C-alpha cells in the first residue's frame, strides 16, 4: 500500500508534515533528557510503523546493520581488553618516561587519551584514564583540574581521527562505504595538529602552577606499571586480536569485507580466546558479563534513530531540505563546506551530535547528484565529521565523555563548573574548528 495514502487514512495528515512532527517531538524529548533516549527513539520508530508511514519491511531497510555490528563488535573487544590492565599500564609508563614532570605528564596524559579515543569509545577512554590521573596527580600534589579538562578535549579530538573513534564517523563511514584509512588520511592530520596546539596552549597557561618537589616525583617514579597488568595472557590475546582487526579495517576494501563484519568476527574470536579454558557455568558467566558491558542503550537508540530518520527520507523531507540548502549556498561546494563545518560545531556543542549527523547524512546524500556526485561532495562530508566531533568540546554537555569526567571529578571533591568550563571550552572549540577550516581550505 502507498505510504502516503496510508498515513492520510490513519492520521489525516500529510506524510511529510507527520514525519516532521514525529521526529521533532522525539528530538526535543531526547535533548531534554527527561526520558531515556533509546526509549524515545524506539517509540518514535514504532509510531512511524504503526501509523502506516513506514511498512515493517521499510523500517528494517532503514536500519544500518553495518554500523550496529561495528559498534557492538568494538564494544566487546574493548570490554575484554580493559580487563587486562593495558590502558592503566600505558598511562603510568608514560608518566615515568617524562620523569614524572607535571608539565610532561600533562602532554602524556592528553596524548594517551587522544590515541585511545581514536580506537575506543570516548566514554570508555576517560573512565580508564581519569582514575590514573587522580592517582598520579595526588602523588605529585598538583591540581588535577587542567589534566582533566585537557583529557576531555583530547577524547573528543582523538575520536575524530579515525573511522571507529566517534559515532558520527561510524555513521558517515558506513553510509558512504568509507574505509578506515580514508579517515586516517583526511582527519588524523587535523586531529594531531589540533592536539599539539592545545597541549602547547595548556602548557603556556598552566606551567606556573604545574610544579612539584623531587620527593613527589620520586613517589611516582616508584610506581610499578607492570602491577597494572591484571592478566598477561589476556593482554597478549587482546592485543593480537585488536591488531588483526585494525589491519583488516585497513585492507577492508581489498578483502571485500564490511567494517561491521570485521569487528563482530574479531569480537567472537576474542570471546573464544577469553573463555577457551573455562567450563560450563563459569564460561557462560564470563560471556554474560562481557555482554552486560555492551552499551545496549546506545545500540537500541541507533535502531530507533535509523527508523525515524528513514521516515523523513522516504517522505522526501530531507530531499527538499537538501535542495533548499543548495539554493541557499548557490550550489557552491566552498560555501557548503564552511556552513556545514561551523553550524555542525555550534549545534553539536548544545545537542547530541548523533541524531544531528544521522539526519544530515540522507540530506547530504540527496544533494550529491545535483552538485556533481560523491567525489565533488566529499569535502562537505569531511566538514560534517569535523564539525560534529569537534563541536562536542563546546560545552560541558556537548559530549558524553565531558559529563562523565565531570561526574568522576565531583566524586573526588573537584567541581568542574559549567560556566568556568566555558572559559576553556569555547576558545578550544573555536580554535579546533578554525584549524579544521584551514585544512579543508588548503586540501580541497
Image (cartoon, grey):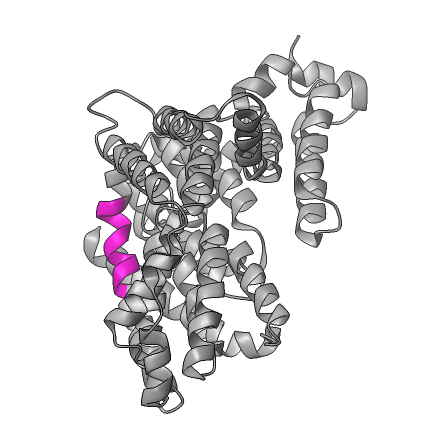
Residue 276: horizontal and vertical position, in percent? 41, 25
Q: Nearer the viewer, residue 69 or 239?
A: 239
Residue 427: horizontal and vertical position, in percent? 43, 74
What is the magenta range? 184-193
Q: Is residue 246 above or below residue 392?
A: above
Question: Which quadrant of the figure contains the N terminus?
Answer: top right
Q: Is residue 63 left or right of residue 43?
A: left
Residue at the image position 62 percent from the left and 31 percent from the top: 304
Say if the magenta span includes residue 183.
no
Say if the magenta span includes residue 192.
yes
Q: Nearer the viewer, residue 128 or 233?
A: 233
Q: Is residue 155 left or right of residue 406?
A: left
Residue 296's image quarter?
top right
Q: Is residue 117 above or below residue 309?
A: below
Residue at the image position 32 percent from the left and 51 percent from the top: 161
- Can residue 320 be seen? yes
- Can residue 326 be seen? no
Q: Nearer the viewer, residue 38 or 173?
A: 38
Amino acid at each position: 500500500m502507498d505510504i502516503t495514502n496510508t498515513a492520510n487514512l490513519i492520521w489525516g495528515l500529510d506524510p511529510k508534515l507527520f514525519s516532521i512532527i514525529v521526529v521533532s517531538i522525539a528530538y526535543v524529548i531526547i535533548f531534554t533528557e527527561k526520558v531515556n533516549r533509546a526509549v524515545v527513539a524506539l517509540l518514535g520508530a514504532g509510531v512511524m510503523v504503526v501509523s502506516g508511514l513506514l511498512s515493517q519491511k521499510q523500517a528494517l531497510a532503514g536500519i544500518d546493520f553495518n554500523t550496529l555490528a561495528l559498534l557492538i563488535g568494538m564494544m566487546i573487544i574493548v570490554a575484554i581488553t580493559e580487563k587486562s590492565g593495558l590502558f592503566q599500564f600505558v598511562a603510568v609508563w608514560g608518566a615515568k618516561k617524562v620523569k614524572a614532570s607535571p608539565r610532561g605528564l600533562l602532554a602524556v596524559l592528553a596524548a594517551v587519551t587522544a590515541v585511545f579515543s581514536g580506537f575506543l569509545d570516548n566514554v570508555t577512554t576517560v573512565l580508564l584514564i581519569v582514575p590514573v590521573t587522580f592517582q598520579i596527580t595526588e602523588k605529585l600534589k598538583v591540581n588535577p583540574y587542567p589534566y582533566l579538562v585537557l583529557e576531555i578535549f583530547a577524547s573528543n579530538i582523538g575520536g575524530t581521527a579515525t573511522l571507529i573513534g566517534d559515532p558520527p564517523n561510524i555513521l558517515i563511514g558506513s553510509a558512504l562505504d568509507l574505509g578506515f584509512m580514508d579517515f586516517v588520511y583526511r582527519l588524523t592530520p587535523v586531529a594531531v595538529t589540533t592536539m599539539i596546539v592545545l597541549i602547547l596552549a595548556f602548557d603556556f597557561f598552566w606551567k606556573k602552577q604545574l610544579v612539584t618537589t623531587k620527593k613527589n616525583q620520586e613517589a611516582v617514579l616508584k610506581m610499578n606499571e607492570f602491577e597494572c597488568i591484571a592478566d598477561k595472557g589476556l593482554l597478549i590475546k587482546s592485543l593480537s586480536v585488536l591488531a588483526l582487526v585494525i589491519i583488516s579495517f585497513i585492507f577492508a576494501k581489498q578483502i571485500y569485507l564490511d567494517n561491521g563484519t570485521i569487528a563482530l568476527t574479531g569480537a567472537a574470536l576474542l570471546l573464544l580466546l577469553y573463555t577457551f579454558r573455562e567450563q560450563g557455568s563459569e564460561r557462560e558467566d564470563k560471556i554474560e558479563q562481557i555482554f552486560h558491558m555492551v552499551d545496549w542503550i546506545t545500540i537500541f537508540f541507533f535502531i530507533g534513530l535509523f527508523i525515524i530518520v528513514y521516515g523523513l527520507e522516504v517522505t522526501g523531507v530531507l530531499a527538499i531540505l537538501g535542495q533548499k540548502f543548495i539554493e541557499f549556498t548557490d550550489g557552491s561546494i566552498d560555501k557548503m563546506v564552511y556552513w556545514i563545518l561551523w553550524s555542525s560545531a555550534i549545534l553539536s556543542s548544545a545537542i547530541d551530535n548523533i541524531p544531528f549527523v544521522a539526519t544530515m547524512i540522507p540530506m547530504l546524500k540527496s544533494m550529491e547528484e545535483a552538485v556533481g556526485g560523491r567525489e565533488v561532495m566529499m569535502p562537505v562530508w569531511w566538514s560534517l565529521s569535523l564539525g560534529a566531533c569537534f563541536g562536542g568540546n563546546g560545552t560541558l554537555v556537548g559530549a558524553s565523555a565531558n559529563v562523565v569526567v565531570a561526574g568522576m571529578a565531583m566524586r573526588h571533591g573537584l567541581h568542574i563548573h559549567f560556566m568556568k568550563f566555558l572559559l576553556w571550552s569555547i576558545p578550544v572549540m573555536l580554535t579546533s574548528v578554525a584549524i579544521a577550516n584551514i585544512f579543508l581550505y588548503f586540501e580541497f
